Every structure is written in structure tokens, then in C-alpha cells.
Image (tube, rainbow, N blue to C red):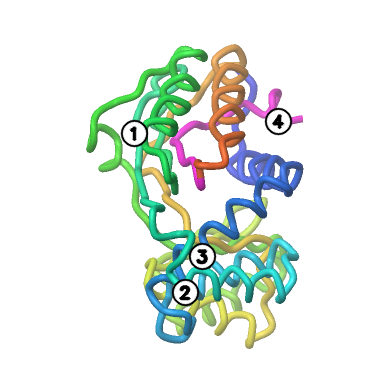
Amino acid sequence: MAGHSKWANIKHRKGVQDARRGKLFTKLIRELTVSAKQGADPDSNPRLRTAIDKALTCNMTRDTIDRAIKRGAGNDEVDNMEEVTYEGYGPGGVAVLVYCLTDNRNRTVSDVRHAFTKFGGNLGTDGSVAYLFNKCGQLLFDDLSQEETLTEAAIDAGAEDIIADAEGIEVRTSFEDFMTVKEALQKAGFSPAQAEITCLPATSVELDEEKAESYLKMIEKLEDSDDVQNVYSNAELPDSVLE
């Protein structure tokens, strides 16, 4: 079997997101409006603060962000939006978490179920795979030359773990401390190649090339839905399908 690279997997996912920037903006605006229902001040609303940061990272304009926040804070069009999480297994038995924001639960579950079954997976019950994932902050750095000073700065900022290998440095934080750690590292002169709130699996499942192709098609189908905000899995893909 071809080799598996964690960084290749991460970069592939980012590349897919960039290629679907139009849909990504739709999802980001939806997250901004729903987050703003809990308060329009990002200093007292960590979820909104994270949503704004992600939108800016994806080059969304301040005007667009402000309009989304005002709409959410006004509690008008987003009142009927609800958050729904679906869990299941994809090709090769990989665990998959699907986070959605929807105004029509029946439509959303139908779309999600169809994506799973079409590509050899199956939708599970609540709690069937969620226990395998940990919600946390993740910051990735490509520059290995400052590993020691970055590690010291990350520890001082409150990071929970720092993992370095030949391809880069990964800094993990608790969900609550993500923005604090990120801002502290940026002030110290370290700019992450990627930074986000994510759900990291405790274990991973390596897929062969055939299963990986089916898995990627399933993820693409899921992410094509405007209702689907994020998809997380414990799949490790062979480098051959990421090239």
C-alpha cells in the first residue's frame, strides 16, 4: 500500500475547501449569523470570535461579515435554524461526523443518508462514533527552523500538546483556549499555515486506494450540501489519491 502522510491529508482537505470557496462562503455566513444569536460582541462570544477569524482567513470582506452578524443579532431570518449532528461509517469502516445547520431537518437527513449509502457507508445512531473524536484547536506550522522557540511560546500560551515531525509542527489547544493561543503565537511572530477548531480522532483507519476513492466521493457529496457545515473523519488516505 502507498504511504500515508498526515500533512498530505490535511493539505488535501484545505485544497478541496479552497476549490469550493463559493459554497464555503455560504457556510461561513450561516455560521456567523447563528453564532451572533448568542451575542454580537466577539469578545464575549467565543464561537462568534472563531467564526469571524475563520471568515477573515478565507478572505471574506469585513462588510460581508458585519452584515451577517447584524442579521444574526437581529434574530430574524435565522430563528428557524437548528444545529444537527449526524454520525456514521464510511467506506472501509471509517468513522464520520457531520455537523449541519439547517432549517429543514428532513431534507438534511435525507441528503446525508443518501451520501453515506451511495458510496458504501451507513448512517449510524447518536453516539455511535462521536466518542472517537475530541473537539479542540489545531494550528499547523510549516517552518521547522524555529521549532524550539515555537514550542516554548506555545507552552507559555497554554497549548495542550506540540507535535513535530519531518513535515511540520502541530500545536493543539483546548477548544476554549484556541483563540488565546493563536493570538499569543501571532504576537510572538509565528504565523500558522492553518488554524481552526476541529474534531480530531483518537484512532485512525488507513484506507487502500479503492476505498479511499469511494470515501472522497462520499465526502464531496456531503460537502456539496449547503446544510453541511463540517465533516470530520478518522480516515488516513494513501498519498496516491492525494496527488
Residue type highlighted by circle 3: Thr
Depth check: give the residue in front, 178 or 106.
Answer: 106
| Distance from the alpha carbon under mark 2 to that under mark 4 | 43 Å
Where is residue 107 drawn, in percent x and y?
43, 31
- Which span of residues is magenta-colored? 229-243
Where is residue 5 drawn, in percent x and y?
61, 38
Which structural element holds mark 4?
loop
Residue to which mark 3 is pinned: 33
Residue type highlighted by circle 2: Gly
Residue type highlighted by circle 4: Leu
Residue to which mark 4 is pinned: 242
| Distance from the alpha carbon under mark 4 to that under mark 1 | 25 Å
Which structural element holds mark 3?
helix
Residue to which mark 2 is pinned: 74
Camera-side mark, 1 or 2: 2
Camera-side mark, 2 or 3: 2
Q: Write down the quadrant of residue 155 in the picture.
A: bottom left
User: From the image, which quarter does the C terminus lie in?
Assistant: top right
Q: Is residue 129 left or right of residue 120?
A: left
Residue at left offset 59%, top offset 68%: 68
Q: 10 Å neighbourhood of mark 3: few (<14), some, or many (≥20)?
A: many
Which structural element holds mark 1?
strand
Depth check: give the residue in front, 64 or 229.
Answer: 64
User: From the image, which quarter does the N terminus lie in?
Assistant: top right
Tell me if residue 215 comes above or below residue 53 in the rendering. above
As for residue 236 lying within the magenta part, the answer is: yes
Where is residue 181 drawn, in percent x and y?
49, 78
Which structural element holds mark 2?
loop
Q: 10 Å neighbourhood of mark 2: few (<14), some, or many (≥20)?
A: some
Q: Are marks 1 and 2 in contact (CB under 8 Å)?
A: no
* For marks 4 and 3 on the same chain, the one whose residue lies earlier in the sequence: 3
| Distance from the alpha carbon under mark 4 to that under mark 3 | 34 Å
